[in-house]
Amino acid sequence: MSTHPGIDPRAPRFGAGITAVLLLVTIGLWLGGATVAATILLAAIVVLFSIGAFAGVQRHPYGRIYKSLVRPRLEPPTDLEDPTPPTFAQGVGFVITAIGLVLSLVGVPLALVVASSAAFIAAFLNSVFGYCLGCQIYLLLARAGIVGRTGATAA
Amino acid sequence: MNPLVYLVALVALATVLGLVWQRTQGRVTRATGEAAEFASSGSLVTLLQFSTEVCAPCTATHGILDTIARETDAVAHVDLDITHRPDLAARFNVLQTPTTLILDRDGAIVARIGGAARRDVVRTHLDRILETAA
């Protein structure tokens, strides 16, 4: 699969937990009337997702927090994981929240709440249950011809 | 709407979804059909695993099934990356990876495991199949 060095599988779940809490705060701010604060916070979340998606999940700030603060308090990981699946999940999070942010900025009502809620569910499932978004969605995208290495299709 | 009510409902919904999803993972269900060209000749049972390239549990399941196949003479393990085989995904109705089909010696599909396989569950099921096959 990937030639990247493995990552501690608990790191992306830790990051997803922080993301889930931030998304809940975003929704709470918006529904509570603090729409500007909610928009700024969602914009920050979009930026964080973009770091994970485009620079790779290993370079995500939450990964650094995990490494410096959390991992030293835990047992070493039993096995390491390919960083590609969590990087893909970051990309999905980026797309959902970016669409919500843009639609909200152009005035679509509740776009921010809907997108943040969808992203929250994915982040929560990932963090709490170890749900693997890539395992469900990647195959559907591959079947639709949207993702996958070029050249090897229709083998 | 009271924001707090919405937030609590959202967390509750996500929890229910998670519990339902967790229940389906690794469960062995009866299945029918044939996959004769993938049955390993000389084995009573073939574990036919479907994987994709972006899938951490696929790697874990590969390890578990591979160990079982090496421990048991009559069992073979085949792992197919179907990222570029939408025809296979459609034929076997694979909606998530890993998905594992259990084939008998003639390549008939006898069971299906959706999601990450669990060693003890697979073991128990295989023992039952091998008992009847013997």
Image (cartoon, coloured by chain):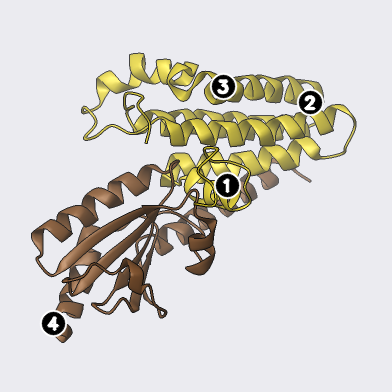
Chain colours: A yellow, B brown
Judge depth for marks 1 and 3 and give the one in front. Answer: 3
Residue in front for this viewpoint, B82 or B100: B82
Is residue B124 placed above or below B68 in the rendered structure? below
The type of residue carrying mark 2 is Ala
Please give the chain letter of the residue carrying mark 3.
Answer: A
Specify whether residue A135 is in view.
yes
Cα gap from disc 1 to disc 4, whole angstroms? 45 Å
Is residue A24 placed above or below B109 in the rendered structure? above
Q: Mark 2 and mark 3 in contact? Answer it, CB < 8 Å.
A: no
The type of residue carrying mark 1 is Val
Residue with the most extreme right position: A107
Kindly identify which numbered label has been placed on residue A54.
3
Residue under disc 4 on the same chain as residue under disc 2: no
Please give the chain letter of the residue carrying mark 2.
Answer: A
Cα gap from disc 1 to disc 3, whole angstroms? 29 Å
Residue in front for this viewpoint, A83 or A37: A83
Kindly identify which numbered label has been placed on residue A103.
none
The residue located at (34%, 59%) in the rendering is B49
Judge depth for marks 2 and 3 and give the one in front. Answer: 3
Cα gap from disc 2 to disc 3, whole angstroms? 30 Å
Label 3 crowd bin: few (<14), some (14–19), many (20+), radius 10 Å: some
Q: Helix, strand or loop at disc 3?
A: helix
Cα gap from disc 4 to disc 2, whole angstroms? 65 Å
* Location of mark 1 (residue): B11
- Quadrant into which the C terminus of chain B falls: bottom left
Kindly identify which numbered label has been placed on residue B131.
4
